Amino acid sequence: MDVEKVLCMVGGSSETSYASNSTIPRKALLRIRPMLEEALAEIYRNLHPEKMTVADLGCASGPNTLLLLSEVIRIISNQCLKSGQQPPEMQFFLNDLCNNDFNNIFQSLDRIEESVRAEKVTIVVPYFVAGLPGSFYGRLLPRQSVHFFHSTFSLQWISQVPKDVGDIKNGMPLNKGNIYIGKTGPPLVGKLYQEQFRSDFSHFLKLRCDELVPCGQMVLSFLGRHKKDILDGEWSIIWGLLAESLDSMVREGLVEEKNMDTFNLPFYTPSAEEVEAIINLQGLFDIIHFQTFESNLDPFHNLDDDAVLDNVQSGANCAKVIRSVIESMIASHFGSTIVDDLFSRFATNVAKHLLKEKLKFPILALSLKKKE
Ligand SMILES: C[S@@+](CC[C@H](N)C(=O)[O-])C[C@H]1O[C@@H](n2cnc3c(N)ncnc32)[C@H](O)[C@@H]1O
């Protein structure tokens, strides 16, 4: 699978688009506001740049991209108004893979100002916005040119499916019956995914360190895992329900078995300990804040409320979220004809699972400062 070609959220603004199904990262973005505020204010106070460059990595398309821009404009405008200093000119780079719906973002840029003004803040910074297509596992910007990187819900996507996960062992695919690390799957698969993440995330840190100005900062949030045991992750359950749905289609002859055998997700949710160990081993960044918080897979479900009132509706809500994220990957591997049926089966499987337990997962959020 060529991840750079097949990974892309559903574009546009229809009911099945990512833009209409991205409430979960939006809530996370609102939750990390204090981290954003602290990092940007510190950069502004310490560096007083005449030109300030900010890049959002894995921006997708939809309201969250605009929310991030308006937050940064609000924070820097407030800082300028407080200090009475000359405002910097701000350059925003919105990065994602080449198939991302950048046009959808560009067409809605005029909403940024509305949302800053809604917070009763006067915009005093001139700003410029540019799309930046390409993988964040490669260099994106000139050396020492960026003051601040942000990324929400993107770094759990690894650069490739670990090479040996598709191996045939004793005549059987190593990861038979799974599309990710299976709860009862071979431990070697977990190790291969973990190693791929370690290598990708280390590389990502090195690249961003090269691109950041001295004392530049990053705020990153992505999906993680509570348990130490790699096979016991929350996403092994969620992707396991999708694998079951695919498997039922194989049994009914609607999907070829060899297609299912060769489909594995380029995805990994690390534990907080793994992430911290990688950052510390590399020694390029100081960790300023590191938080873990939870989310429900059903964006309409209150976290504190343990009962699932309507499991069928909730299954459908969860299926819409997952479909908006991986429809393009499914369609490119299996063909677009299976998509409706697959996600309807997935909704049913989720609904059944919700009778036993809710589907929740942790989000890791951290702010990092480039070491002097
Ligand atoms: C779940 S979306 C998150 C979008 C947005 N940040 C938000 O909070 O709603 C993840 C995005 O990361 C992008 N992505 C994944 N791997 C990437 C890579 N290597 N380089 C650039 N973007 C990537 C995907 O294409 C997708 O648009």
Image (spheres, rainbow, N blue to C red):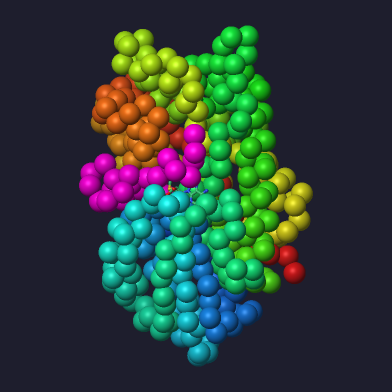
Q: Is residue 272 magenta?
A: no
Image-based side of 311 in relation to 58, left or right:
left
| As drawn, 14 above or below 286 | above
**Image coords of residue 309 (percent x, y):** 29, 30
Residue at position x 66%, y 23% in the image:
188
Residue at position x 36%, y 26% in the image:
334
**Image coords of residue 52 (percent x, y):** 53, 76
Q: Is residue 21 magenta?
A: yes
Q: Is residue 115 visible?
A: no
| As drawn, 106 above or below 27 | below
| As drawn, 6 above or below 110 | above
Image-based side of 336 in relation to 8, left or right:
left
Residue at position x 72%, y 45% in the image:
277
Residue 142 figure quarter: bottom right
**Image coords of residue 244 (percent x, y):** 41, 18
Image-based side of 298 in relation to 7, left or right:
left
Between residue 162 and residue 76, name the one nearer to us.
162
* Magenta residue span: 1-27
Between residue 124 and residue 140, name the one nearer to us.
140
**Image coords of residue 132 (percent x, y):** 46, 62
| Quadrant of the image containing the C terminus | bottom right
Residue at position x 55%, y 19% in the image:
175
